[in-house]
Amino acid sequence: MLYKSITILCSVLLLFSLTNAQLKGSIEAETEMADPFFFHDVVTYPLETRDSVEVEIRVKVPFDAIQFLKVEDYFEAKYELSVLVINDKKQTTFSKIWTQTLKTESFQETNSNDLFDVNEINFRALPAKYTITIGVLDLDTRKSKYKKVETDIEDIYKKPISISKITLIEKIVQDPDGSERGIPSVENAISDLQKEFHISFDILSPGGKGKIEYIIYDMNRKMVFMDKLEKTFPEGISHEIILISKEKLSFSRYKIVLTVKIGNHEVMSEKTFQLRWQGMSNMIENLDLAIDQLKYLAGSKEIKELRKASKVEKKELFLKFWKKRDPTPNTEENEIMNEYYRRAYFANENFSGFQPGWQTDMGMIFILFGAPNDIERHPFDTESKPYEIWHYYELNRTFVFVDESGFGEYRLITPLYDYHGKY
């Protein structure tokens, strides 16, 4: 009975929240849970002078992460992007803050998970260990999100040959002058639209005969694919692009390990990446986990059928499941799927403890209802155990969570089943 009521409730509320812009704005703007989501990547390149390193920071902000406002005959959003680089001596190496403005005439695009604003920041740094803090501040809601990246380039010139970080190429485009260039994948993911994909990297060496070898592993450390090529490297910087087949890859995460050998010297670089299918949410990294996370929306029989299916059938059944719930079936983007897994991702980031965040009571409520309008926190009341009250004013719902154990494991004491049949 509980899961049937959850299924009904979730179907209605998710669709309602995704088709009502005012509801989305009011919920996400009034709670600290609505941090702007963004992707980032940090790539370091060796230089011929060997006295410093070229650092490139890429930041990709989805349109639906920033609040758009109606301005005359278009919609506008503004956010502040900040980058702070601190070395291992706690000294500031680089810092920058600037404002980005997004505009669109389409209301549908303001909620798009497929449209992005991409930024690249380049600077030079001495070989050392760095902590890079990247921040996005929504200038309308004043909500912010900060991510830290640890980068160690202290020993980049320790050997006669040096190698950059690997860049995953999303696609190759042709410029007006006829030259080709690669568009990097900031979220380190590739789609299944093409049969191959590219990686790029730089090698600094004295030159000579050598070879490049790469191995792709799955997340269980099982080798999926290996290849190598021999070549003669020029002295100085060599820009390398390798074409890799996706034939043996399926929807999953992988790690590519790249080894370059020239003479008696060898260097390595590695990168974790995701292969995604067309029509799949960017928030999904593992299909089996995504199926497990359907427990708040699908029945146990439906989930069991998905789990038992072959790889090809599993993909088709999963996409069919979400296609039936797509509020805009004539578009490529499935907003309800994107929102559901965005919430699951957020739950994992914020409510994880003894179990993954999406499996906790707080995670369940967040996935079902989104961010609350208001949160009452009572962590130190002398006459009660720590508890929180989540208020959803538009939905006329309140949920109470109590930390019975004292270890931050908040359990829901407000039952869900009494809402059955009210929608």
Image (cartoon, helix red, strand yellow):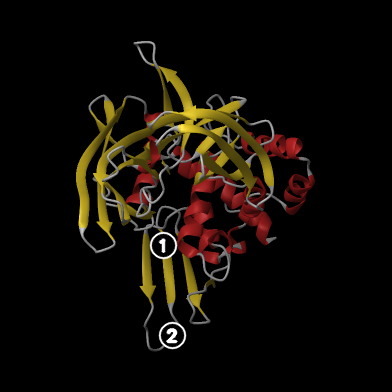
Q: What element carries label 1?
A: strand
Return the residue nearer the eye: 407 or 32.
407
Q: On the image, numbered disc 2 is attached to which residue? A: 384
Mark toward the viewer: 2 or 1: 2
Q: Can residue 93 be seen in this view?
A: yes
Residue depicted at x 62% and y 38%: 322
* Up/down of 364 relative to 405, above or below: above
Which residue lies most toward the top here? Answer: 177
Q: In this view, does 2 lie to the left or right of 334?
A: right
Residue depicted at x 65% and y 52%: 221
Return the residue nearer the eye: 28 or 395.
28
Q: Is mark 2 on a helix, strand or loop?
A: loop
Q: Is residue 238 left or right of residue 284?
A: left
Which residue lies most toward the bottom here? Answer: 383
Return the x and y of residue 373 as percentages of the image width and height. Answer: 37, 57
* Up/down of 54 relative to 416, above or below: above
Q: On the image, numbered disc 1 is attached to which residue? A: 391
In the rendered structure, which amino acid carries the disc numbered 2? Ser
Return the x and y of residue 211 as percentages of the image width and height. Answer: 55, 35
Return the residue nearer the eye: 169 or 228.
228
Task: Bin the neighbour count of mark 1 within 10 Å (Cα to Cα): few under 14, some 14-19, many 20 and up.
Answer: some
Task: Bin the neighbour count of mark 2 within 10 Å (Cα to Cα): few under 14, some 14-19, many 20 and up.
Answer: few
Return the residue nearer the eye: 140 or 131.
131
